[in-house]
Image (cartoon, rainbow, N blue to C red):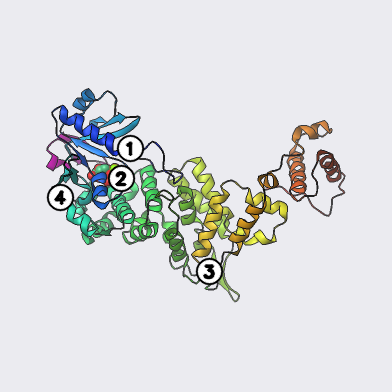
Amino acid sequence: MKDVDVNGSDSTMKPNYEDAVEIVHQLRQAGYTAYLVGGSVRDYILGRLPDDYDIVTSAEPKDVRNIFPKTLSVGERFGVMLVVKNGIPYEVASFRKEEDYLDGRRPARVFYCTAEEDVKRRDFTINGLLMDPDTKEIIDYVDGRVDIERRIVRAIGDPFARFAEDHLRMLRAVRLAANLDFEMDPALMAAIRGNAAAITKISAERIRDELSAILTHGKARKGMELLDESGLLAELIPEIKALQGVTQPPVFHPEGDVWEHTLRMLALLPHLGGKANLRLAWGVLLHDVGKAPTRSEDERGVHFYGHVEQGVKISREILERFRFSVDDEKTVLALVKEHMIFMNVKKMRPERLKRFLRMADFDLHLELHRLDCLASHGMLDYYEFCREKLAEYSNEDLRPALLIRGRDLIEMGLQPGPLFKEILSAVEDAQLAGRISNVVQAREYVHSVLDGKNKTRPLKNGA
Ligand code: ATP
Ligand code: MG
């Protein structure tokens, strides 16, 4: 149970080990068996800081509710309660086995059982370990420890059957192998290949969250390669698979085809606080997606006419397919749309450049551009130029207080209408360019625009 961190930064309200252990103690004091299980035990052995702590117990949900003052019963029917400590929810699951997977995702019924039976229905051996937090003893019914040591993701039981009962596990396997930098057991990989087409039965949101974790929680390149090898990429994002073999001019792209270029950028994603920024990561994945359908070749070479427009269109389809939030979609589409504009920064007039530099999320745009360069020709001239200009311009230079607003135009006797935006934008351009700097000049400028005295400098809508 966890959310993907949108900003790639650590939130302050994180689950913590002490509170998780306290929950284990309280369960034991009430006479039940209780352990830490799953990811936190795996991460403990690996020396990694877990994202969350899951607890298993012989107590049934109704018992859990009696022991703790604050519980939430999100998955009670499936034997899972949330215990809230210091405002943070911890998953407390009753030892249970599941039967009759009907929809490839959720079991129809659960039965309470022993700890051993409980871990045997878990997904991967590395996730099937129990730990006594007091003695640090690890209880291993699934040979998970040796797989952690050998860094292998292996299914508990027959992988084919396990993926057929819950298709999401296929994506979880790729996510774990990528994020932990583990190898996939060959039988597990073969089983994913055999079941890959079923992944589309999983809800768009769950797929999105797993893909996002693959892209942002470490080793995104490896994650994409495993998605590809396993057949999941072709099922989930065929538009990205289509970038394979889309060759590019070697002068600009000595690294190879668009797929290789995209993978190299993913490998370079910065991981602040252990995670990459979600929107940047998706922007990187999608930035050149329009190149597959637009590639053409003539005697002058290879072209991708309109790849940005196509890229925005295809990206929108992908982001909507995975039900991204409106804000995520907007930012990612802007990253795709603007990524080629960096080539023009040195030629821009000051007002155009300032508008570009003050664009929302410019830090993400600039970072995507930096990765774009590093994953191809390696020249950072435009990146450096933007950094210099950002250092040179003050906030006041980039976002000066407006000299004129709509109500001033009304006072000047103008009728509100579409022309307003054009005039205001032209006045702001003149201000950004340093041609005017006070209200009197601004009013004169409005008149000059209206009188058509400014014919040499056509009105332009601002960005
Ligand atoms: P992390 O929290 O680091 O992403 P995790 O292994 O803790 O990894 P969770 O989603 O928190 O993953 O799940 C907790 C545990 O529940 C897993 O370690 C695994 O034992 C079990 N589990 C989760 N999802 C499944 C599934 N789809 N099928 C079987 N077992 C699962
Ligand atoms: Mg977990």
The image quarter in which residue 341 lies: bottom right
Considering the numbered disc 2 on the image, is that residue within a helix, a strand or a loop?
Answer: loop
Answer left or right for 230 relative to 293.
left
Query: Label 3 sits on what residue type?
Result: His
Q: Earlier in the sequence, mark 2 or mark 3?
A: 2
User: Which residue is labeled 3 in the image?
Assistant: 377
Q: Which quadrant contains ligand 2?
A: top left
Task: State the count of labels.
Answer: 4
Q: Report if residue 295 lies within the magenta region.
A: no
For the residues labelled 1 and 3, the Cα–Cα distance comes to 43 Å
For the residues labelled 2 and 1, the Cα–Cα distance comes to 9 Å
Mark 2 CB in 8 Å range of ligand 1?
yes
Of residue 55 and residue 117, the one placed in the foreground of this image is: 55
Q: Residues within 10 Å of mark 4 (few under 14, many from 20)?
A: many
Considering the numbered disc 1 on the image, is that residue within a helix, a strand or a loop?
Answer: loop
User: Which residue is labeled 2 in the image?
Assistant: 50
User: Which residue is labeled 4 in the image?
Assistant: 142
